[in-house]
Amino acid sequence: MHFSTSKAIHLLCSLALVLIFNSCGVSKNKTHRDDEGFVQIFDGKTLDQWKGDPAYWRVEDGCLVGVVTPETLLKRNTFIIWQGEMPENFEIKVEYKISGEGNSGINYRSEPIEGLPYALRGYQADLNGANTYTGSNYEERKRTTLASQGQKTVLPALDNPADSLQIHIANNQWMPKIVTGSLGDPDSLKTHIKVDDWNEYHIIVRGNHMQHYINGILMSDVTDNDTVNRRFKGFMGVQVHVGPPMRIAYRNFRLKKLD
């Protein structure tokens, strides 16, 4: 059988993803609260309490895995959504491994979108294989980038809450945000993120304050004073993104309720 050039490229992409992720590495899942007060919300064996499109999500080697192939390219981002109850204030710790061209994120305090299955609107702990966004705070389908890598920001109340959000967005950035400090140069921060290997994402959310850590390094810090657009409750889910074939794996997914 003869292959076209495009089919050969697609095959090579698929093989590359398999080589990078030949094994997730079995996670040491716990069903009880650990010494730090975290509880596992993914059992490493089933998708119990998770709801997503089975064309993209599965369990593999103890990991929650999202895969986009040349045959299943997306027209819009899709999530697998945890069905458990999210506390208002919480911490999340999870390990992830993403392919070089992959793009994903961990949404929280998010809302479903009527008429769009497996879509979420809300805050996102962003991550990608190139590490250009990893650690940022991005608001999916709403205000866009609330803090880029290395930024500490405050989001002020809008002067006219009735304004369309689009008039406040430029270059995928929420323009009303106020940068109040630096957490480090993005190029320097990227050196703490491993490529083609496991990293730990740590999200701390209390009130209107959100912090994203990668491997123990604070990457973004947001205080949301926008009383019209901020949210304190909602769903949590993880994403596969529109773009080239990709693979994302999550393991040791833990949640801790904060007072």
Image: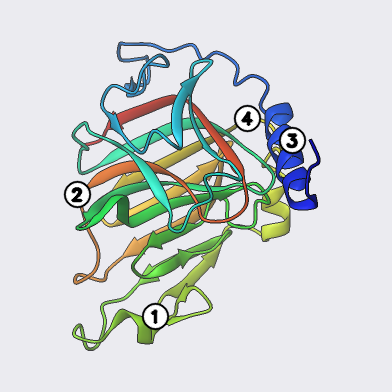
Residue 198 badge = 4
In the image, taking residue 123 as reference, residue 181 lies left or right, namely right
Percent across and percent down for residue 76 are 43, 58
Q: As drawn, which residue projects farthest toward the front? A: 1
Percent across and percent down for residue 256 are 30, 29
Residue under numbered circle 3: 16
Per the model, the C-alpha gap separating discs 2 and 1 is 23 Å
Foreground: 184 or 78?
78
Per the model, the C-alpha gap separating discs 2 and 3 is 39 Å
| Amino acid on which the number 2 mark rests in the picture | Lys
> Residue, x 19% and y 58% (percent of image)?
114
> Residue, x 35% and y 56% (percent of image)?
123
Which tag, 1 or 3, sits closer to the chain's start?
Answer: 3
| Amino acid on which the number 3 mark rests in the picture | Ala
Residue 194 badge = none
Residue under numbered circle 1: 176
Percent across and percent down for residue 115 are 22, 57
